[in-house]
Amino acid sequence: MSERIHPKPVNIREIFIKFSTEEQCLEYVEKMRWPDGIVRCPTCGDKNVKRVMRTAESKNKRPWFYLCLNKDCHQQFSPTAGTLFADSHLPLIVWFHAIGLLLNAKKGISAKQLQRDLGIGGYKTAWYLNHRIREAMAESDPKQLGGIVEIDETYLGGRVRGQGVKFAKKQKHVVMGAVQRGGNLRLRHIPDAKIDTVSGFIKATLSPDVERVMTDHASIYPAILKPEFVDRHERVNHIVGEYVRGDVTTNSIESAFSLLKRGVIGQFHKLSGKHLHRYLAEFEYRFNHRTDADVFIGTVQRLCGFKPFALRGTHF
Ligand SMILES: [Zn+2]
C-alpha cells in the first residue's frame, strides 16, 4: 500500500519572499477580506472610507487602518478586524511565517522551536501562536468517511519517571483514528476505550454506506461494529503475525499513528490531555491537505475568517 501520508512540502522560501514585509501581509489580508477591492466599514457598511497610514506616534499596531467617513459613524478599523489576527499584537509576518513552518513540519513544531525560528520574545507567546493556528485547523463539521476505512486506537502519554505503572495507566490518553483509503483521516481524543465511548466515535465517523471496515483483531471491534457494519468488517490478526491479507490491512492508520507519536514525543514533556485535541486537529489537517497545492493560502484564509477562541492570559 503506497499511499501518500506525508504532505506535499510547502515552499518556505517562497513564503518568506512573498511575505517579507508587514505591509505585504496586511495587503494580503485586506484582499481576502474585500476581494472586490472595495473596503467597507464593518460597523455601518459605508464605502466612504479613508486609509490612514501609521505614524510614529500612532497607537495602531498595523501599518495602516481605515477611518469611516460617514459622519454618524466615524469608526476606525483595521483590515484584520474580526479575524484571528485582530487581538494579537504580533506582527502579521510572524503569523504568516509560523503558518508556513507549521504546515511544513511533518511532526509538528514545538513552541520552543517556533520561538527560536521566528525570534519571538516569549515562550508563552509562541505557545499561544502555535495553539491558535492549530485551533483554526480544526474541522468544524467533518464529513463521514466512506469507501474502505481503517480503524485503530492508540495510547499516548503514560509513564513519567519516578511514577509507578499504575499511575502511568491513568495518565494515558486514548486516541481513536480512522482513515479512508485515499481520503481523509480522523483523530479523536476519547476519555476511555470502553465499548460505548468507542461506539460514539464510530457512529460519528463512519458513513452508513461505507464499503468495508478494517481493524486489527482487538476483541472490542466486532461488538462495536454490530449490527450495522459487521457484514463489512474485516480483520488482520497481528498476534499471529498477520499484517496484510490481500488488501486487508491497517497499515495506513498505523503509519499515521506512528508519525503522530513521533511528533508528540518531541513536543510534550508531560502530555496534557487538555490541549491534545488541538494537536490532533493540526495533524489531521496536514494529512487531509496532503495533496493540496494551495494549503498555505487556504490556511491563511481560515485564520482570516476565524473567530478567536478564548484563551486565558492571552497577551500578545
Ligand atoms: Zn462606518
Image (cartoon, helix red, strand yellow):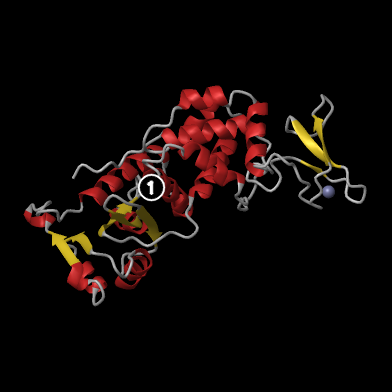
The location of residue 284, given as percent across then percent down, is 39, 49
Residue 128 in the image: state x and y as whole percent: 57, 42
The front one of 278 and 247 is: 247
- Res. 106 visible in picture: yes
Q: Residue furthest left?
A: 240
Q: Amino acid at mark 1?
A: Asn
User: Does residue 264 lie above or below 45 as drawn?
Assistant: above
- Residue 29 appears at what percent x and percent y? 64, 38
Q: Residue at x 22, y 73 (%)?
A: 223
Q: Is residue 152 left or right of residue 175?
A: left
Q: Quarter of the image holding residue 150?
A: bottom left
Position in image of residue 315 (x %, y %): 67, 41
Q: Secondary structure at mark 1?
A: helix
Question: Left or right: 74 with respect to 89?
Answer: right
Number of marks in picture: 1
Q: With 204 as the anchor, is 302 left or right in this view? A: right
Q: Is residue 194 left or right of residue 117?
A: left
x 38%, y 32%: residue = 9
Determine which residue is flagged by label 1.
Answer: 288
